[in-house]
Image (spheres, grey):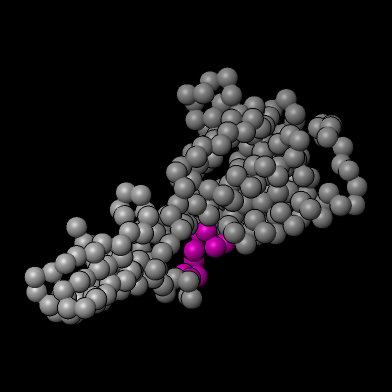
Amino acid sequence: MLTCSCVFFCFFHRRDFAYVARDKNTRVLKCHVFRCDTPAAAIATSLHEICSKVGAMRAPVRSLVSRAAFPMPKTELVQKFHVFYLGVTSVSRPIGMDVINGAIENLLASTGKEDWIPVILSIADTTVAVIKEKEEEEVLVECRVRFLSFMGVGRDIHTFAFIMDTGSQHFQCHAFWCDPNAGCVSEAVQAACVLRYQKCLVARPPSQRAGSSSSPSPDSVTRRVTTSVKRSVQSLIDTLKPKKQSSELPQQ
């Protein structure tokens, strides 16, 4: 059966007609030859017109597919890290490395090593959860990624914190102590934010999706997080360059 995927056709003399097409199963090009009862020229002309119409119908579909091409989000992946939970403190602003560093230093100064809680930091593209290590059913903190306004690695490369928008202009900063450093935790949270942003873009209508690339929303949480990640990662790199920092916990 001819499906208009033929690549060449012609007629010889008056009654001989042939076309070349790729076999659907073997993908091998084959030449099909016919002796016709009607003039071969008429058959070739009709076939040419049909294939031209089919090709014209397929062109807009291909164009739409190419324009609609968009990276689909990966399947949700949960990453878990064993860290120490330093605690939570209220902060005045939702963004800023100075806010992150100030909160971490205040929590380190106000708590002793014995007060730190061993927890599992569970990071998915929708939720960041802090779960007690020995009692995995007890969730201490649960933050929707959409409400995570800022994150960063502290001045000490073992420390990491994120700011959560709890509504009504109230913000909380949760801090952690990570071994051997906070780099992997920071990257995991960054990946969750990027994946969340990617899913939001995919869910938008194409018209809004196109506009979002040129003029992103000024209050985009993910955009702010991405900026903070770049700063915190650069801070981590700069900290590692001058000297190797002791992995010992601070003495209280």
Residue found farthest to the top:
134
Image coords of residue 179 (percent x, y): 74, 34
Residue that appears at 56% across and 26% down: 132
Apparent side of residue 66 relative to residue 231 in the rendered image (left or right)? left
Residue 195 visible in the snapshot: yes
The quadrant of the picture occupied by the C terminus is: top right
The question of residue 218 being in magenta is answered with: yes
Image coords of residue 12 (percent x, y): 24, 76
Apparent side of residue 204 relative to residue 93 in the rendered image (left or right)? left
Q: Quadrant of residue 156?
A: top right
The quadrant of the picture occupied by the N terminus is: bottom left
Task: Judge by depth and name the residue closer to the eye, 103 or 5.
Answer: 5
Q: Quadrant of residue 40?
A: bottom left
Residue found farthest to the front:
13
Residue 48 visible in the snapshot: no
Image coords of residue 80 (percent x, y): 58, 33
Up-down relation of residue 89 to residue 212 (above or below): above
Residue found farthest to the right:
243
Task: Judge by depth and name the residue closer to the eye, 40 or 243.
Answer: 40
Up-down relation of residue 104 to residue 71 (above or below): above
Magenta span:
216-224
Task: Judge by depth and name the residue closer to the eye, 201 or 91.
Answer: 201
Image coords of residue 4 (percent x, y): 24, 66
The question of residue 98 being in magenta is answered with: no
Residue that appears at 67% across and 38% down: 176
Residue that appears at 60% across and 44% down: 188
